[in-house]
Image (tube, rainbow, N blue to C red):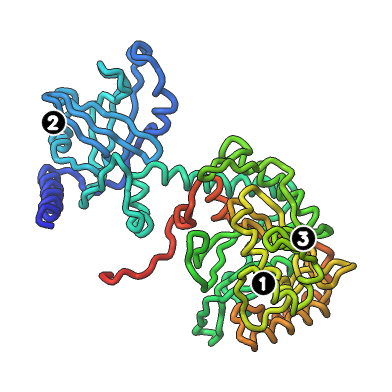
Amino acid sequence: MPQEHELLAQRRANMEALAQLGVDLYPHEFDRTDTVHRLVTAHGERAKEDLEATRIETKTCGRILAIRSFGKANFLVLSDGRARIQVYIRQDSMPGLDFQAFRLLDLGDFVGVSGHLFRTKTNEFTIWASGLTFLAKCLVPLPEKWHGLQDIEIRYRQRYLDLIVTPETRRVFEARSRTLAAIRDFLDARSYLEVETPMMQQVAGGALARPFVTHHNALDMRLYLRIAPELYLKRLLVGGMERVYEINRNFRNEGISTQHNPEFTMLEFYQAYSNYLELMDMTELMLSEVARKVTGGEDVTYGETTLSFKAPFRRLSMRGAVCEEATRRLGREVTEAELRDLGSARALAGQLGVELEPGMGPGKITAAVFETLWEESLVQPTFVYDFPTEVSPLSKQKPDDPDTVERFELYAGGFELANAFSELNDPAEQRRRFEQQLQERQKGDAEAHAMDEDYVHALEYGMPPAGGEGVGIDRLVMLLTDSHSIRDVILFPLMRARKDS
């Protein structure tokens, strides 16, 4: 601790010395001609002779990641977050004040340099500095720069520090940005309209989840942070917007894990005159295109596995998949009829060691058994389709099977990536489903869907047949960047309050 205080004191002393020299400690701007990344990209491979012949002048800036001195020769390493470049400093090559400022620099400081490009005797691509401008002082020592930031908690709590010293972190978030751009390009090219819906809602709807609750003082109104934009997006279908999408922030007051963060990003899109089968085909095309644009190909490395986003993806019906795996594990034939009967479904779950909650019907039991038997093994992109009606209050039933809805979930990497269905547009049936959910809520299910009278009223004006889908952006980025915690792909994930804060 004493050594740390000495380092902090030395940095402040250097800043005071700069001020005594008349150096502007926090200048308003620096008129650069190039970024470090552009210099390295455009000229980093040019030969020594070529650089000498053309004598390229430049002005650039960045954060100092290294300082080295060898007699009269001094070197800085500058980074703009995307690339690094070496800077050669000599006292006889720049104004005296600039060199005095150089002597007071610390690792992490921001500086601007002007000069020309060349290669050193060791062939290092370098700027021969003719001028140096101080831009900002780093008052706190940086972590060991060569090995990145090893403390996981500090990486998440102080993402700015992680970005400074861990180049891979920046590459993850650049890939995230490209993912969003690729999705927008795909949907815009198909005449989808990007829209925005409320993040504070009077009814927390569109998903089965526990919401965050807040209060509007002026209106004296209880409000919920959005758990999904679904019901508002479908109101737009009623209004005649045939293809809409939103890349939205959702908030769910639930547990935290490597796959769950209370605040997360979803893509939701809705297409009139469509159904879940058409969306399956469209999802394959979209994810294949996104993978190519973000990673350069349809094969993506995730851990020790290569995921293929090349269409077509594997397809499994939920009840069929449960019967297949249960038959294999129990050594006897398990039929779909067993899954549709409450008593036999509960007995089957017991035989398979699946824990159940009181009041679960055969549909919820089937979904619970599926998650236990299959979810983690679905590594390659796989569509699981035709869900029990009991777990799908907003989905349209199959014409010949009222216990089953036209719904699919896409799994990849062992977790759910997307959820879609043919949208329920019968207002009477929607009201019945909401009322059924209210009964579940009265039994203690905190995640049951609330009644939304205005949404039912909107359906009474008529909503065309439609398909709708939600895709977890954070989880998709995890797969595309080989990240194994959702916190690795969210710039500022929610963290437990520190005891010393």
Marks 3 and 1: which is nearer the front? 1
Residue 356 is drawn in which quadrant?
bottom right
Of the image marks 2 and 3, the number of the one nearer the N terminus: 2
Determine which residue is flagged by label 3: 320
Q: Residue at x 71, y 69 (%)?
A: 366
Q: Nearer the viewer, residue 184 or 381?
A: 381
The percent coordinates of residue 26 (x first, y second) are 25, 49
Look at 77% across and 75% down and name the residue there. 458
| Residue 373, image x, y percentages | 64, 61
Quadrant of the image containing the N terminus: bottom left
Above or below — where is 369 with respect to 70?
A: below
User: Of callouts 2 and 1, which one flags the residue occurring earlier in the amino acid sequence?
Assistant: 2
As measured in the structure, the alpha-carbon distance from the residue carrying label 2 to the one carrying label 1 is 80 Å
Q: Position of residue 73 (x, y in %)?
A: 16, 24
Nearest to N terminus: mark 3 or mark 1: 3
Measuring 68% from the left and 79% from the top, which residue is drawn there?
A: 360
Specify the amino acid type for callout 1: Ala
Element class at badge 3:
helix
Q: Based on the displayed image, in which of its 4 quarters is residue 296 positioned?
A: top right
Horizontal side of residue 429 vs 107, given as left or right: right
Q: Which residue is mark 2?
A: 96
What is the CA distance from the residue labelled 3 to the residue labelled 1?
Answer: 15 Å
Side of 219 relative to 466 (left or right): left
Secondary element at tag 2: helix
The amino acid on which the numbered mark 2 sits, given as a three-letter code, is Gly
Counting labels gives: 3
